[in-house]
Image (cartoon, rainbow, N blue to C red):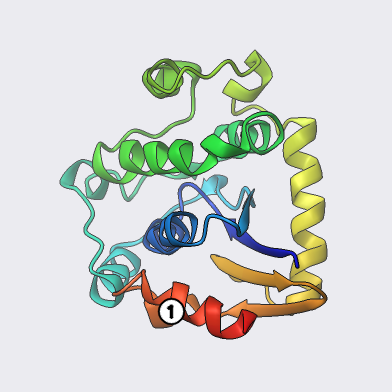
């Protein structure tokens, strides 16, 4: 039997930040479930995040945002580099994808790092001993791998009937189930029970 989870997210999306602990719980408690990380590149430098969004995320998930991040809410966000690096990770070292994403989110939402240049991510790349090509460490354009990811995401979004992110899709044998991640934001480990019920 094959069981997989597809996590559609954006490294700069506050709601994705709140949903990542659910994915971490899945990886920890269900090691036989393969998780695919699909960065959708929602933030392209022309959009930002408002205080109402971060307040709502905190209210519904308990996730807190650091002052360093909140002080830059009026700045437009660009997650192109994140999309490039995460697409490379999924292709070359998928076992590190969660660790890379968590490091990105910590740098962005806690430290206020915009994560748009190679210098912005140099510490993460070094500490995690990553060796991505230069094309994955820029925000000028999407890499080929990231573009392929976007095409896969579009197909999945057609199937599940929504373009909202984050999205968690459970694929078990021939069955597809869109998991309601909102139910588990305050207790991430509860999503493990929900997946086990779907599998059984």
Q: Quadrant of residue 20?
A: bottom left
Q: Residue at x 80, y 72 (%)?
A: 158
Instruction: Give the quadrant of the N terminus.
Output: bottom right
Q: Residue at x 62, y 47 (%)?
A: 41
Question: Taking 141 as reference, is 14 above or below it?
Answer: below
Taking the image as drawn, is residue 22 in sight? yes
116 or 127: nearer the viewer: 127
Taking the image as drawn, is residue 163 in sight? no
Residue 156 horizontal/vertical position (percent) = 77, 66
87 displayed left or right of 51: right
User: At numbered mark 1, what does the secondary structure look like: helix, strand or loop?
Assistant: helix
Q: Residue at x 72, y 39 (%)?
A: 146
16 or 92: nearer the viewer: 92
Q: Quadrant of residue 7?
A: bottom right
200 displayed left or right of 161: left
Residue 8 horizontal/vertical position (percent) = 61, 59
5 or 137: nearer the viewer: 5
Seen as rendered, the residue at the extreme left is 67
Question: Taking 32 as reference, is 67 above or below it?
Answer: above
Crowding around mark 1 (Cα neighbors within 10 Å: few <14, some 14 to 19, many 20+) is: some
Instruction: Give the quadrant of the C terminus.
Output: bottom right
Q: Which residue is mark 1?
A: 182
Q: Residue at x 41, y 61 (%)?
A: 25
Residue 195 horizontal/vertical position (percent) = 54, 76
192 or 108: nearer the viewer: 192
Q: How many marks?
A: 1
Q: Quadrant of residue 147?
A: top right
Residue 97 horizontal/vertical position (percent) = 54, 40
Question: Taking 55 as reference, is 82 above or below it?
Answer: above
């Amino acid at each position: 039997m094959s069981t997989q989870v597809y996590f559609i997210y954006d490294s700069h999306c506050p709601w994705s930040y709140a949903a990542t602990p659910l994915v971490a719980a899945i990886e920890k408690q269900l090691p036989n479930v393969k998780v695919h990380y699909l960065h959708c590149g929602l933030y392209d430098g022309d959009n930002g995040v408002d205080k109402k969004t971060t307040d709502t995320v905190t209210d519904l998930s308990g996730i807190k945002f650091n002052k360093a991040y909140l002080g830059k809410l009026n700045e437009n966000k660009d997650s192109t580099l994140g999309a490039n690096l995460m697409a490379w990770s999924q292709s070359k070292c998928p076992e590190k994808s969660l660790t890379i994403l968590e490091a990105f989110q910590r740098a962005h939402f806690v430290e206020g790092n915009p994560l748009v240049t190679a210098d912005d991510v140099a510490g993460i790349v070094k500490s995690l001993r990553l060796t991505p090509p230069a094309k994955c460490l820029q925000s000028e354009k999407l890499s080929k791998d990231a573009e392929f990811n976007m095409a896969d995401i579009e197909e999945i979004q057609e199937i599940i009937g929504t373009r909202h992110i984050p999205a968690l899709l459970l694929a078990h044998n021939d069955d597809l189930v869109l998991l309601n991640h909102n139910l588990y934001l305050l207790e991430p480990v509860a999503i493990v029970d929900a997946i086990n019920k779907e599998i059984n």
